[in-house]
Image: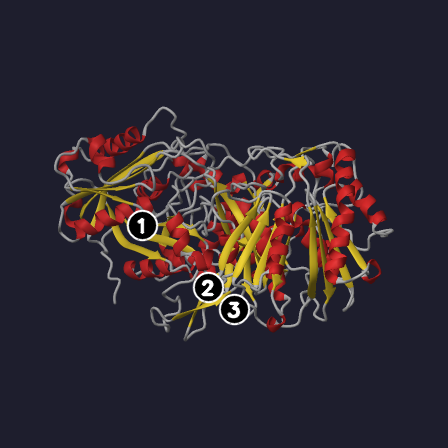
Amino acid sequence: MGGLTPSGVRAVCSHDEDTATMGVEAARITFSSLSGSVNPSAVWFSSSNPPYMDKTNANVIHAALQLDTNAAAYDFGGAEKSGIGALKAALDSSKTLLLVQSDIRTGLPSSEDEGHGGDAASALLIGGEDEGDLIARYLGGSSANEEFIGRWRDPHERHSKSWEERFVVTKYLQLIDSAWQEVLSLTELSSGDISTVVISGSNNRAKNQISKILGVEKPRIDLFEDVGIAGTADATLLLTHALETSEPGEIIALVVLSDGIEVLLFEAGNQKNQSKDTISSQINSRNEITYQRFLQWKGNLEVQPPNRPAPSRISASAAARESEWKHGFIASKAEKSGMIHMPPSRVSTNPEDQIDTMDPISMANTSGHVVTYTVDRLVYSESPPVVFAVVDFVGGGRIPIELTDIEAEDVSIGMEVIPTFRKVFTADGIHNYFWKVRPARQ
Amino acid sequence: MASNGIKDKVAIISIGCTPFREHWDKSRDDLVIDATKQTLEGVQLASEDIDAYWIGTAQSGMSGLTLSMPLKLEGKPVTRVENFCATGSEALRQACYAVASGAYDTAMAVGVEKVKDSGYQGLNAFPMPTAGTNRTLTAAAMYSLVLPAYAKKFGVDEDELRMVVAKIAEKNHFNGAKNPLAQFRREMSAEAICDMAAVAGKLSVFDCAGVADGAAAAIVVSAEKAYEYTDKPMFIKALSLVSGNGSGLIDPEYDYTTFPECAAAAEDAYLQAGITNPREELALAEVHDCFTPTELILMEDLKFSERGEGWKDVLNGNFALDGPLPVNTDGGLKSFGHPVGASGIRMHYECWLQLRNEAPKERSIPQTGRNLGLVHNLGGYPGEMVSFVSILGTEID
């Protein structure tokens, strides 16, 4: 990092990711952690950095997850607080909802924003006990609001600005007592009942001071050193981490300092995240990148692409026709021969199969192995070179496909890979979403 | 079901080829005019003497107007054809069938590509509106997958195999250096090629065909009329084309050490021509060396080598200019570059020169009494390609 170098490491959105694709990956982990199946009635997407304006980003997530056609998809955008706001609205509703909260931090090179920020997404399924054992029970929440100028961004600009931290701290300090007392009175709990306080927000000084006020010496839950401050996704990311590391029955207070204060109380349930992709395991299996590449991915350092034509925009009608394949990674499997076709096909390469005797088969949650691979230093890419692998999937199916989240020298034949939803390129403002594979986390 | 072929029914009576270059000062129309003029003059014909035309171009023009307008043809049927990198050969194939059917007495196939006006490296396909799920890998990268697969399957050391394919480039540059029509006329050592930076897998830029503009043309008539135009016509012994079903992309059995479309096209062509031992019967072969590993695999798919033995035959010099079966005696795509629409006809042009003993002495093949030549094109990628094979001969059986 440039400028003042903070300690720790930060999570960075890759060149082929955006807040929607990160959100999809988070939601895939959330669904994979379920023992049964849950069909949310809506997906709510929150981000201060949405891939599209005007167009609904939640629809992309809906399509990638192949949610029910009748499940709604809505964006909550703009402010960082749209994340915690959506969570609270979901908890107060009686619906089964999928919340996806995702952010990419866009601090200028060498700024404190850059140094503190981390890119991340979290996904939560909100529902009642009739949907299965709960990971956490919501006990109640409070808000304390006041208008003040702390952090802001002109919608046409990429970088946020902040008012002097010392002033902003005073506003949070004025509000915390009211929010805290309100939630305790609502839930009929006392401070002593609360075993874990999780504090989220962009202002480290305010977080430290409020920790002291609430009697938290050193927060048990803090991802500043491992992820960074994740904007819209920060609060639910910290909550998820707290729930992954708590004991059943523990009371967790989530305190969010974001243009006012939100406090939410949860009781950890008996259910635990069944996925192997916990936040800790993801942190432990990280890849490190150079600061140059970081700047490149953030759009703060333009590099010369190979002298090849930049891709042209995708066709809306073609993309709509192929949505199951493009967004859902749904292949087809011949009824008789069992031959899997990627992309799906009406006609099988095996002559014993009849035309139009294929069944859809989802490849999204499969894993495969690298059969052979190559490194393409000639093809257009937003982050050359492109690593490309021929992958055979467990249970059948082969595809030659881009291998992402890897350095060319680290690929090996036989390596286990899994599908991942990515942004292949953007042209004419249209994002081309499709699947790649990435190394499986061990 | 039968692939009957048109053996000895049609002959090429004239063929011409422009230099393949970065023709900054020549338009597509100039190249078309140059190639057709040379070809017509070879038999003292005028454009109105030709009954029907086929123009092959991958993406330098659309429709028959690509040819009829620059040549100012009046009332002639002109068909534009495209079949990836087999485009030029495909134009010739259609012209041959038209004459064989009796529909026309004389037909001309023209191939042209104006590549260098794009300003980009390599060959780049026109973007078609898609859902964005198609692969975007370069052809070089796709063909680079051959090397590790071949090395593993046949137990060849990867570094040794890398040198083997560099030897293929060395051979083709050696031949091309003697050819005034070739784009690159400098010899290159295999060692120098191996020392270059890799751009796709282990392949360097010099493992790839060049990129050039060019045009070529051929006139065909029925075999019985051929001697009215020339003492040494070149008879069509076989024309074969196979368009793959893409199974190599999705079939876990496919191992990147063969191009089944090429093997099938060769099989068909040998049957049509009555060839049982291509290694002993062919005088030369012009094959589609778009990338060095491609030529290695082709030696086996075309049955010039046993499976897994092609690399040894390359090292033994079997396909050298003075070897037992010279391959790419004009320098191949390697030296010529690859104006997609023109390459196939350019390869037939080399067979014409060699079989008629008209190639310059310094790159003449040994006179063995054999009078058959083979032309091979492929277009696409390992796993999904079209492949063309023709057999040509100077005598009627």
| Chain letter, disc 2 residue | A
Given contact means CB atoms under 8 Å apart, are the residues at marks 3 and 1 in contact?
no
Residue topped by disc 1: B371
- Specify the quadrant that holds the N terminus of chain B: bottom left
Residue at the location (53% across, 67% down)? A39
Give the residue type that dot 1 points to: Asn
Residue A92 point in image, percent of width and height: 61, 60
Given contact means CB atoms under 8 Å apart, are the residues at marks 3 and 2 in contact?
no
Residue at the location (18% across, 52% down)? B100
Question: Label 3, label 2: how many angstroms apart (C-alpha)?
Answer: 11 Å
Q: Which mark is residue A331?
A: 2
Residue A150 point in image, percent of width and height: 70, 36
Mark 3 nearby-residue class (10 Å; few <14, some 14–19, many ≥20): some
Q: Earlier in the sequence, mark 3 or mark 2?
A: 2
Q: Nearer the viewer, residue A185 or A438?
A: A185
Residue topped by disc 3: A396
Q: Is residue A48 above or below residue B72?
A: below
Mark 2 nearby-residue class (10 Å; few <14, some 14–19, many ≥20): many
Q: Nearer the viewer, residue A179 or A373?
A: A179
| Chain letter, disc 1 residue | B
Disc number lying in front (3 or 1): 3
